[in-house]
């Protein structure tokens, strides 16, 4: 009968390298004590998921704060699910969020001494290790068809036992090497399976940086490690790549915990030290019925980071929010640090909650408003332009009409200690500042204005006529005093207190007067500070809007 070595040579006649050669080609990294090597390993199967951004953020942070290396590896062994161009897109989106790898797959190129960083280009490496497993009798070719596998499953279901390809059910385990040789030479298609020595009745102890110590059933599945297309499966590629790329900490989603026993057994069999593992909690969402469920690519727009980009959120707002999920002390820290330098925050696995965090759009909005408030008018202009060029032609047209005017609008109540916090995303900019532009203003008042019904048209008209005399060259406080005087002259109380003391004596308060003016000038009941709105609109526009309204009300 042929030996394992002969069988391995029959399957991989061209593989001449050995595992030792690979060890030499990818030497241990020369890093300082405590430096972590982390990786983000996306599959090019579509858009960047918010959960993946979360994972990559933690990977990046852990490497940065320990003086280590963060690299990206493209896991493209599932060729059927691959979407053309998505690898490049993932990388460019990561960059927008400030997550740039030190090494690895960079989209259009790659960098580093541990490559290739795209799994489909690593077939030769996997073959060397699989050949070794064949030689030591810990892997074997499996010729089972999908029909054969279905029959095994059926049997197991009937007997109500653990499904899968293991133990006595692992049919091809029991072929001898001559039978294997004959089948291979007859051209029968095959995959290669790992030969497990475990038993799922037994438990193994594992340690996880987030979950601590726990026990989990040992692996006993003879998993496929090499597919008929010549590429490995995730499990095998993970073990090989993280070993030879010298990853110290594997940070990935919690959905991989059930596969951990497979990985542990593979590392042990190969005699390699397993990396540390950190399985991150999954981001959840409350559905309409109030049940927690995973944030879903299919159902939730916020599951794709592209949603935040297309809507014009500052990318930092999502990162800040994800850091609140990562560590509960982040929020307090960022408040104390006035929403700046978030990258200085020190992340720790111990402070990570095990509960899946509930996605909270309200918090993203909160951070977005804080971040927007910190931008200068020039920054706003640059960012709004970049955003609108890509996503919003209407906004671009508005900005381009007069960039200086746009900046003036955006500067209202900005350059001060407590700037106004009313913007969270560029996509809603036109609806908040449209009234500064005559065409949007006209369109918005077409439907009519909603003045307080307490006041009849004559009163409003009279008040407006009076307010035409407001002097915009005055300082804000003096201007407001003038408004109070005008209000009193029209029979309105100068403040709420005076009005309340003697409501019969007045038509209303100066607040009512200001509201009339605000509605006329902006078409809305709420706007930024009226004095500044008027200054930006300019005297002529204010007077013509007031006159138009008086004519309409007549
Ligand atoms: N390619 C795997 C995924 O996208 C990576 C998991 C891991 O980080 O190991 O889920």
Image: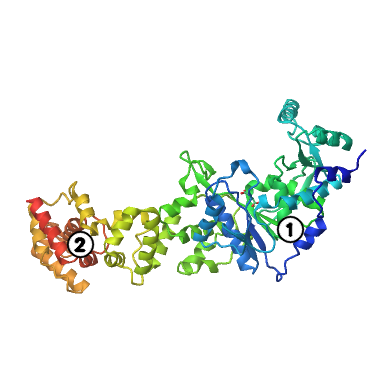
Query: Is residue 177 rendered to the left or right of residue 537?
Result: right
Label 1 SS: helix
- Residue occupied by mark 1: 244
Looking at the rendering, in which quadrant would you find the N terminus?
Answer: top right
Real-space Cα distance between discs 1 and 2? 74 Å
Vertical placement of residue 333 versus 197, above or below: below
Label 2 SS: helix
- Indicate which disc, 1 or 2, sits on the residue closer to the N terminus: 1
Quarter location, residue 484: bottom left
Q: Nearer the viewer, residue 106 or 93?
A: 106
- Crowd around label 1: few <14 · some 14–19 · many ≥20 (10 Å): some
Residue at the location (45% across, 40% down)?
Answer: 288
Quarter location, residue 91: bottom right
- Residue occupied by mark 2: 496
Image location (x, y in percent) of residue 451: 17, 51
Q: Nearer the viewer, residue 233 or 492?
A: 233
Is residue 546 in sight in this rendering?
yes
- Crowd around label 2: few <14 · some 14–19 · many ≥20 (10 Å): some
Query: Is residue 134 rendered to the left or right of residue 551?
Result: right
Image location (x, y in percent) of residue 438: 20, 57
């Amino acid at each position: 009968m042929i030996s394992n070595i002969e069988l391995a040579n029959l399957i991989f006649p061209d593989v001449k390298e050995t595992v030792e050669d690979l060890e030499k080609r990818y030497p241990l990294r020369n890093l300082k004590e405590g430096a972590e090597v982390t990786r983000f390993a996306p599959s090019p199967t579509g858009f960047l998921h918010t959960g993946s951004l979360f994972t990559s953020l933690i990977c990046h942070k852990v490497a940065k704060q320990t003086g280590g290396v963060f690299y990206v590896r493209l896991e493209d062994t599932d060729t059927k699910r691959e979407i053309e161009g998505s690898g490049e897109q993932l990388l460019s989106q990561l960059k927008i969020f400030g997550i740039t790898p030190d090494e690895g797959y960079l989209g259009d190129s790659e960098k580093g001494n541990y490559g290739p960083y795209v799994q489909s280009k690593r077939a030769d490496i996997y073959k060397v290790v699989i050949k070794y497993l064949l030689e030591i009798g810990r892997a074997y070719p499996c010729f089972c068809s999908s029909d054969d596998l279905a029959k095994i499953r059926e049997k197991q279901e009937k007997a109500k036992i653990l499904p899968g390809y293991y133990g006595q059910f692992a049919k091809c385990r029991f072929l001898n090497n001559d039978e294997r040789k004959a089948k291979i030479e007859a051209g029968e298609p095959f995959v290669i399976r790992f030969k497990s020595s475990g038993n799922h009745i037994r438990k193994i102890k594992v340690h996880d940086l987030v979950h601590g110590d726990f026990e989990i059933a040992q692996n006993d599945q003879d998993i496929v490690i090499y597919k008929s297309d010549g590429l490995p499966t995730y499990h095998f590629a993970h073990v090989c790549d993280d070993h030879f790329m010298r990853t110290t900490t594997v940070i990935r989603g919690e959905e991989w915990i059930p596969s951990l026993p497979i990985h542990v057994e593979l590392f042990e069999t190969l005699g390699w030290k397993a990396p540390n593992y950190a399985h991150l909690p999954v981001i959840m969402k409350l559905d309409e019925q109030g049940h927690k469920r995973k944030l879903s690519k299919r159902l939730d727009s916020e599951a794709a980071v592209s949603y935040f980009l297309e809507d014009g959120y500052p990318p930092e707002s999502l990162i800040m929010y994800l850091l609140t999920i990562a560590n509960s002390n982040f929020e307090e820290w960022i408040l104390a640090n006035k929403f700046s330098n978030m990258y200085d925050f020190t992340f720790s696995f111990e402070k990570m909650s095990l509960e899946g965090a509930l996605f909270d759009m309200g918090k993203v909005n909160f951070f977005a408003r804080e971040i927007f408030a910190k931008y200068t008018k020039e920054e706003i202009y640059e960012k709004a332009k970049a955003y609108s060029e890509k996503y919003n032609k209407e906004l671009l047209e508005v900005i381009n009409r007069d960039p200086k005017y746009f900046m003036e609008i955006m500067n209202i109540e900005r350059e001060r200690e407590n700037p106004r916090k009313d913007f969270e995303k560029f996509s809603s900019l036109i609806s908040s500042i449209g009234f500064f532009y005559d065409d949007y203003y006209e369109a918005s008042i077409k439907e009519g204005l909603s003045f307080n019904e307490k006041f009849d048209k004559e009163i409003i008209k009279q008040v407006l006529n009076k307010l035409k005399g407001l002097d915009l060259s005055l300082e804000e406080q003096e201007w407001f005093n003038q408004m109070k005087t005008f209000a009193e002259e029209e029979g309105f109380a100068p403040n709420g207190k005076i009005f309340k003391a003697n409501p019969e004596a007045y038509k209303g308060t100066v607040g009512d007067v200001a509201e009339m003016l605000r509605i006329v000038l902006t078409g809305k009941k709420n706007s930024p500070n009226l004095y500044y709105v008027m200054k930006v609109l300019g005297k002529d526009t204010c007077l013509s809007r007031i006159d138009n309204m008086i004519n309409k009300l007549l």
